[in-house]
Image: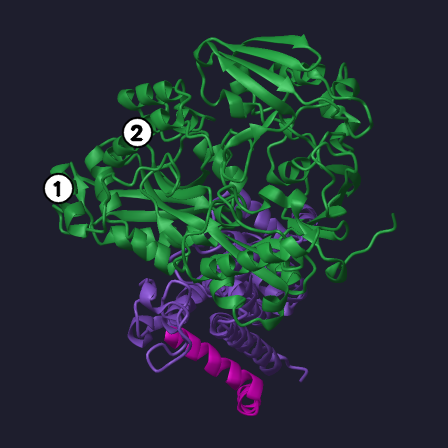
Chain colours: A purple, B green
Amino acid sequence: MVKSRILSKVNGNILFFSGLIIVLLFVFVAAFAPYIATHDPTYIDFDSVFLPPSAVHYFGTDDLGRDVFSRVIYGSRISLFVGFVAVGISLAIGVLLGLVAGYFGGFADTVIMRFVDVMLCFPAFFLILAVIAFLNPSMFNVMAIIGLTGWMGVTRLVRAEVLSVKTRDYIVSAKVQGLPVWLILSKHILPNVFTPIFVTATLGVAGAILTESSLSFLGLGVQPPTPSWGNILTAGKDNIMFAWWLSFFPGIAIFITVLGYNLLGEGVRDILDPKS
Amino acid sequence: MIRVRFLLLAALLVFVGCSDGGSNTSAEKEVKSVKKTAEKTKDTPVNGDAFVSSSLGDATGLIYNITSDSASHDVAAKIYNGLVEYDKDLKIIGDLAESWDITEEGKVIVFHLKKDVKWHDGHPFTSADVEFTYKFMIDDKTPTSYDADFRLVKSFEVIDEYTVKITYDEPFAPALISWSMAVLPKHLLEGNDVTKSPLLREPVGTGPYKFKEWKAGESITLVANDDYFKGRPYIDRLITRVIPDTATTFLELLNGAIDMAGLTPLQWTRQIDTNQQFQNQYDKYKYLSFGYTYVGYNHTKKPFNDKRVRQALTYATPKKDIVKGILFDLGVPAHGPFKPGTLWYNDDVKKYDYNPEKAKELLAEAGWTDSNGDGILDKNGKNFEFELMTNQGNTVRTKICETLQQSWEKIGVKVDIRVLEWATFINEYVDKQKFDALVLGWNITNDPDLYDVWHSSNCGGRKLNFICYKNEELDKLIVEGRKEFDPEKRKLFYHKAQEMLAEDQPYTFLYVPYSLVAVSNRFENVYSAPAGITHNQDKWWVKKENQKYHFEP
């Protein structure tokens, strides 16, 4: 029984469960940020700059006297949002191009895959930096650019899966019955390449969160006063010698979240991999 | 010593500055300088050692008449001399000029040059070099931004080898100090294209230090000029290291690898007090800097052309909180474009103590009320919202923007912050006047002339009155002020000008920061004066037993 085999793998998979718990926790925090935060994350108070962690300010305060705990909590919203939207964009592009390239082959395949090669030639982060320099740094631009520069892996993966799936008997049968191409693609091929897409997407969210944090850290991502883990870290960098809490807490938040998504991705792969 | 103003990229790293503001630290310094004076009577200065400083960028060329970066200026200033210079109290004294006469009510200046001055290559210095420099500065082919003052010269005559006569159309008070521009060697440059001259890389001047070596992107080394006409400087070598980032500079300072560096208020208040190694190696100097930070409003745009709106925004600006919270009290609130404590500064002007209620009243008077109840003021169906811009890489300015955003929100004004890369910010937004309001800083020059930044004729793209403030009365004062040579009479024009600026609030003047400098304590005879701290660097010296670097003669 396939189902019970998967379930038994789920039961014994610590990776999957720890990842899932972290991710759910993270989503919960982001969704209920206003109820969890103890202060207004953008409220500037010059009477309480650089306070170390205490019962009032769990994670201390930053260089403008803002509560770091509340900023980290609200920052999770940015990370979640950027992660999902960016991955959504790259999935949409990647899956579509991968399906087309894999299913139709020939000229379309050549053109798409060479374009993928060209895009992969640019070091992704520098490409993003260059594009940001032309546009204005803002959350929406960051999401769009991360998405638009991250679809190539998905395309390759989907194409490879489609190449193997399309030779199966049920596809041949569907073709013989005269089903329209879009129906074959959406009803018969897409569901069967879903597993690797899901794994890549999960890992992709982790990558997007990291990229967003790096950009914000450099001042090219989310703009002040909106808190994001990356721009909280920027304040931390200047003051790391005496205000460790400014770097430590957002750093830990990034670490745990990215770890969570990676564990989840790995876990799902293990569970759905028929060979293990 | 250049009169032309330039936009300050990092207002907190300025070295030139003025006397102490009166605090614990200054008291410490006073004790120390008394001790040092006492030592000086016992010890005679000796030659030797090197002074290592750092620069964020590499110099672009060592003829500073045609460069505009501070790295080039700082190095080249040790290689060349002008005809005149400022002394430690900011009085104008002769440099290459022995003396001068000002006649015909200020229209004519006759310079008598020093004799027996030699270029670094041994060639004698004469009036021909001065004439060459003048012609070079007004040549249309010379790519310089410092030509404006020299273009006002009506005629330039060489009387004899050591006398020149300069005539102006009308009296021009800043004329004298404009001759602090570096004098260039005619015998090496005449007939050559200066922009391609080898002297840009290996300069020859008359100054206290001679060029030795330039490792591109790494360091520039100068050696003492034994034949310097004011006497050989005591320190053998000046080494300027290129360290492209402030955090690394600070670490190098803590390691003792550089002898002088500017500090940020944060480093000053939080990071060095507890560092024993630092305390043992460095003396700290603190003095009000020659610069101020402000919010500029674009007067070509509504609603900033309404005086009441600008006054309201100033009323809603917590200057004292900004100085306390962001500068850690290492600055003073500013109310005009001059430095507190100088002759030109007028303290008796309208000040706008933080008062949000008053701000709301003024805005209501100007027609801005919250008629739709969304928390943002509006007028004729348009919300009061605008963009506040500043440059990247200056965290202090970003923090100011965030503070203003919050305090202006309280009076119902919505602000979006935009932080832009420096070159883009200046070229695409400031020069093209595509901004609503911005946070920037100006250098304060020693000469009080306000023409470049405040005269209405300088409104426009690529000019310094980019906010396009126009006030005919102020224009008149500025023009009159340029004609008066007597400082006591001249200051009255600028005191009146400050009253006008305070009333009109074309800028919201924010603060004048302190210059915070650490200098290695092995150097003797270091003290701060109105001209800053490096004004007498030629006379700094190190006791034999403290010397750190040794060179083969």
Mark 1 and 2 residues: CB-CB less than 8 Å, in contact?
no
- Please rate how many residues cluster around mark 2, counting C-alpha atoms within 10 Å: few if below 14, some from 14 to 19, many from 20: many
At 62% across and 29% down in the image, what residue appears?
Answer: B95
Q: Position of residue B282 (x, y in %)?
A: 61, 62
Pointer 1 or 2: first along the chain? 1
Mark 1 belongs to which amino acid?
Answer: Ala
Q: Main secondary structure of the magenta part?
A: helix
Q: Which residue is mark 2?
A: B497
Q: Nearer the viewer, residue B90 or B180?
A: B90
From this view, report whether residue B77 is shown above or below residue A109.
Answer: above
Please say whether residue A87 is visible from this viewpoint: no
Mark 2 belongs to which amino acid?
Answer: Ala
- Please rate how many residues cluster around mark 1, counting C-alpha atoms within 10 Å: few if below 14, some from 14 to 19, many from 20: some
Q: Residue furthest right?
A: B552
| Image disc number at residue B339 | none
Q: Nearer the viewer, residue A271 or B378?
A: B378
| Image disc number at residue B364 | 1
Q: Secondary structure at mark 2?
A: helix
Q: Position of residue B213 (x, y in %)?
A: 80, 41
From this view, report whether residue B402 is shown above or below residue B377.
Answer: below
Locate residue B88 relative to residue B186 in the image: left or right.
left
> Quarter holding the N terminus of chain B?
top right
Q: Which residues are magenta?
A: A1-29
Q: Is residue A17 magenta?
A: yes
Chain of residue at mark 1: B
